[in-house]
Image (spheres, rainbow, N blue to C red):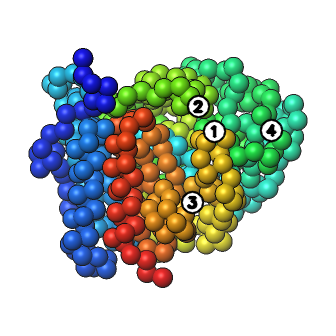
Amino acid sequence: MRHWFRQNLIDPFPVEEVTTIADDEVDPQDADLTASDIRTIWWAVERLYRSGIQPAIAICLRRHGQIVLHRSIGHTHGVAPGHLPAPDRRLAQPESLFNLFSASKAITAMVMHWLDERGYLHVGDRIADYIPEFAQHGKDGITIRHVLHHKAGLPYLSDVAMDLDLLDEPDEIIRLLCEARPTAAPGRRLEYHSITGGFLFAEICRRVTGRSIREILDEAFCQPLGLDTFNYGIDEPRIPDVAPNILTGPPPRFPLSLLFERAFGMPFEAAIEASNDPRFLRGIIPSANIVSTAEQTCRFFEMLRNEGEWNGTQVLDPRTIHRATAEQTWGEIDQILMMPIRYSLGFMLGSSSFGLYGFNTPNAFGHLGFTSIVTWADPDRAISCALLCNGKPVATLRNLWWLNIMTTISARCRPIR
């Protein structure tokens, strides 16, 4: 039996054998960086791969709108820990598809802000203004704003296990949410809403536009940004192209395991298995299942960093982005994640000291995805980035090599203002 700290780790290949560099990287000097800066950032990515907790990694980094890093390392398929390499082992590519998981929340939030900008709704409105039956059990005061910054008091459905068959029954999902009892009065307690909020937003979208949130995302962002794979789930024939998610490192133990089970409605390992299920990958889970590439995800955040403009098209009003990224919580402990998180109306924010996006990143905004997905923009450094991985480690210090990538990027991409 392997020692416990080797549990579920992959056996990395020599990095030069499993690295692919896209042909759209520019000379670092064109983006006010040096070749040394890029080498150092890429070395941090290689170090994460060599840790054994990430089978596949894809990254896209823009600086001043220019792609300075667009690479992949590892294998998306055929290298699950504890097994011999499969005959269908597949090398990761810069254009490989990954599930963004909770990073989807930031994109879904911008769909709601887009609807607000166009007069379909107002983020200060009550959920019950659009879904009257939601007002049961004291939920009549919950607003769209409360859900956007995780203070709606509905972080999970008590005593309701996640059932993938429900994805084909959106009316039943809304019925369960309407009948649910809140954990706290709206605005009272900061509690990460892992899944629930997205379904409410999808139903509001349907009721105010008559169309699905998948169709609205396509109109609002995919078409103007030229994104051909950036939506909730993916067509059935392309499901095998999505990097499968793999438990790497020891599984979480109590009490961490309880926190995950409460948030996901199932144990941690079962959640990983469910994320590879075709029902999950083809459904609409607005909080958790946008499928995309690193470059297309980075492109979306670059548009936000550039105050809503992309290639001469004004996709969003700058005021909408300022509202969406303004801090809403101040030093509060998230009662689900059990750590202080600075939330805006849809994003996890950086820190003036040390945070998710490195040192001195007070104006950075982005989002995590279960458990090693992260995408963000930092206007102070003129950067946008997407780091996509399919390993799912939790209880291991090797995660520090993942955090080291954001720290290195913030150090090497020095503030411009």
Mark 1 or mark 3: which comes first in sequence? 1
The residue tagged 4 is 184
The kind of residue on which mark 4 rests is Ala
Give whichever of 410, 365 is nearer the camera.
410
Kind of element beneath mark 2? helix
Residue 398 rendering spot, x and y as whole percentages: 34, 42
Mark 3 or mark 2: which comes first in sequence? 2
Q: CA distance from mark 3 to mark 2?
A: 22 Å
124 sits to left or right of 92: right
Give whichever of 244, 217 is nearer the camera.
244
The residue tagged 1 is 336
Within the image, what quadrant is residue 248 found in?
Answer: top left
- Residue name at image x 31 percent, y 30 percent: 5
Mark 4 or mark 3: which comes first in sequence? 4
Q: CA distance from mark 4 to mark 3?
A: 24 Å
Kind of element beneath mark 1? loop
Residue 133 rendering spot, x and y as whole percentages: 84, 32
Residue 6, placed above or below residue 415: above
The residue tagged 2 is 259
